[in-house]
């Protein structure tokens, strides 16, 4: 009898849910989305180590009757939901990984987690908002699973690990998901992605047609000198002095050689390592940094000049230097035709006055690898409380997101999906 009553109650709930308007359904899921976000924020996991995160996503998708594939690119989860009628295949993507950052906020659900990063124990924090992306896409999956009669075709919910980069010696991220066939079986026609923004007013959407985010490359410069006593610098070759001049020289590639009226270029040194104590001039030094470009010709120019300039500067100070430039994320490129088609979806979801057209930024996203294979649109969702608190940057200990903007993320993804699949 209890089983029969439960079945009847579930039927009545499901029927009632299906009779509600889509806007009402979305409004009613807000508490769940915020609860999921807070759970992921309190339990962050590093790149390629998102085991518990993946399990929670998997269980949620399966509870909705969505076909689920796990262990894609190590910890990735992919859900496939078919509409009642055949049509195109759309990918919706959320990244899952956190960062090796200590959380300094006073949130009741702040992270106290630790993890292993490049062999060292580190604090772990969702300092880039990927926790919000997961929760939003889980909400979209629930809404769309209750409304298969409202769209044609198929939606692939792609929960991606390692957007911030795989650990040393490992593959990962969008590139590995593609390699393992995430865009096939069935073949995905287009893909949409979002990113929360701590510096953009809550309940706004920002976009740009064409290149919206920069390509990112990691560079490593190794400088070799000759060790000597600190009191006798003329007895050796100082790699630290040569490194200082190299770092200074790199900035002239931006200020004197890059055509900045065309597109932005950034060269930043994030780490320099050398020496063991105050009275020894060491034998070697290492410089590690990043190159950000929004034009591939300019990227090639910068790469070529670095390979030419760095050894020459080192030689001027009697040292030797090698340059290694790794390929990172591509330019995040919003297909112009698809972007034009989708802008009305933004305006329906957020209101025309809350849709902002922006200039490109020099941050980078490995969503770009999906866009290299198929047309895609990537946009920003506002997460800043207007006029109430300082907007702390991403990747910092004080990073904060206003959760009242998450519902717009669900609404926007749902609207984009309906408009794209039913066109």
Image (spheres, rainbow, N blue to C red):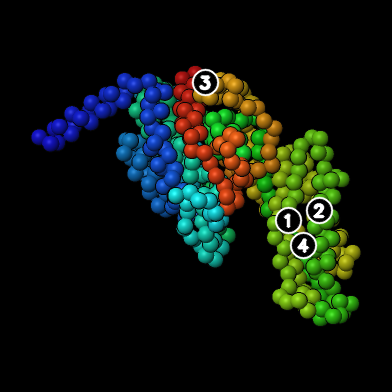
- Which residue extends farthest front? 388
How far, Cα to Cα, is label 3 from label 2?
46 Å
Determine whether 185 is above or below 83 in the image.
below
- Number of disc labels: 4
Identify the residue under disc 3.
Answer: 348
Mark 1 Cα within 10 Å, few/some/many (few <14, many 20+)?
some
**Residue 173 in picture, x, y percent from top left:** 54, 48
> CB atoms at circles 3 and 2 under 8 Å apart?
no
**Residue 146 in picture, x, y percent from top left:** 34, 28
**Residue 371 in picture, x, y percent from top left:** 59, 36
Marks 3, 4: nearer the viewer: 3
The foreground one among 400 and 278 is 400
Which of disc 2 and disc 4 is earlier in sequence?
2
Mark 2 Cα within 10 Å, few/some/many (few <14, many 20+)?
some
> CB atoms at circles 2 and 1 under 8 Å apart?
yes
**Residue 29 sits in quarter:** top left
Identify the residue under disc 1.
Answer: 269
Determine whether 77 is above or below 355 in the image.
below
* Residue at image coords 55%, 54%: 104
Marks 1, 4: nearer the viewer: 1
Image quadrant where one finds the N terminus? top left
Which element carries disc 2, helix, strand or loop? Answer: helix
Identify the residue under disc 4.
Answer: 322
Image mark for residue 250: 2
> CB atoms at circles 4 and 2 under 8 Å apart?
no
How far, Cα to Cα, is label 3 from label 4?
53 Å
Which of disc 3 and disc 1 is earlier in sequence?
1
């Amino acid at each position: 009898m209890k089983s029969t009553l439960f079945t009847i109650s579930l039927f009545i709930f499901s029927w009632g849910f299906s009779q509600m308007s889509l806007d009402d359904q979305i409004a009613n899921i807000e508490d769940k989305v915020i609860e999921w976000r807070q759970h992921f924020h309190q339990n962050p996991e590093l790149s390629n180590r998102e085991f518990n995160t993946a399990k929670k996503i998997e269980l949620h998708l399966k509870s909705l009757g969505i076909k689920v594939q796990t262990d894609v690119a190590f910890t990735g989860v992919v859900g496939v939901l078919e509409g009642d009628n055949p049509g195109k295949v759309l990918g919706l993507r959320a990244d899952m990984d956190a960062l090796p950052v200590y959380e300094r906020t006073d949130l009741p659900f702040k992270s106290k987690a630790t993890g292993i990063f490049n062999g060292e124990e580190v604090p772990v924090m969702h300092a880039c908002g990927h926790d919000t992306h997961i929760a939003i896409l889980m909400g979209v999956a629930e809404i769309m699973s209750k409304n298969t009669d409202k769209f044609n075709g198929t939606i692939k919910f792609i929960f991606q690990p390692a957007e911030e980069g795989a650990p040393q010696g490992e593959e990962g991220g969008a590139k590995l998901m593609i390699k393992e066939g995430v865009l096939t079986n069935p073949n995905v026609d287009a893909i949409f992605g979002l990113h929360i923004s701590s510096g953009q007013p809550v309940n706004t959407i920002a976009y740009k047609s064409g290149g919206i985010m920069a390509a990112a490359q990691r560079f490593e410069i190794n400088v070799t000198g000759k060790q000597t006593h600190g009191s006798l610098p003329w007895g050796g070759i100082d790699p630290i002095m040569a490194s200082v001049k190299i770092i200074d020289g790199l900035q002239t590639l931006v200020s004197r050689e890059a055509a900045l009226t065309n597109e932005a270029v950034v060269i930043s040194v994030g780490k320099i390592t050398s020496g063991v104590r105050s009275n020894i001039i060491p034998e070697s030094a290492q410089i590690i940094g990043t190159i950000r470009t929004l034009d591939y010709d300019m990227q090639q120019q910068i790469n070529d000049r670095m390979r030419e300039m760095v050894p020459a500067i080192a030689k001027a100070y009697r040292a030797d230097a090698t340059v290694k430039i790794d390929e990172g994320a591509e330019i995040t490129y919003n297909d112009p035709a698809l972007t034009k088609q989708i802008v009305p979806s933004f305006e329906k979801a957020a209101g025309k006055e809350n849709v902002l057209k922006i200039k490109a930024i020099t941050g980078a996203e490995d969503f770009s690898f999906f866009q290299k294979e198929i047309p895609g649109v990537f946009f920003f969702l506002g997460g800043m409380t207007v006029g109430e608190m300082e907007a702390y940057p991403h990747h910092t200990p004080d990073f904060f997101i206003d959760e009242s903007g998450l519902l717009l993320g669900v609404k926007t993804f749902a609207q984009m999906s309906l408009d794209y699949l039913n066109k």
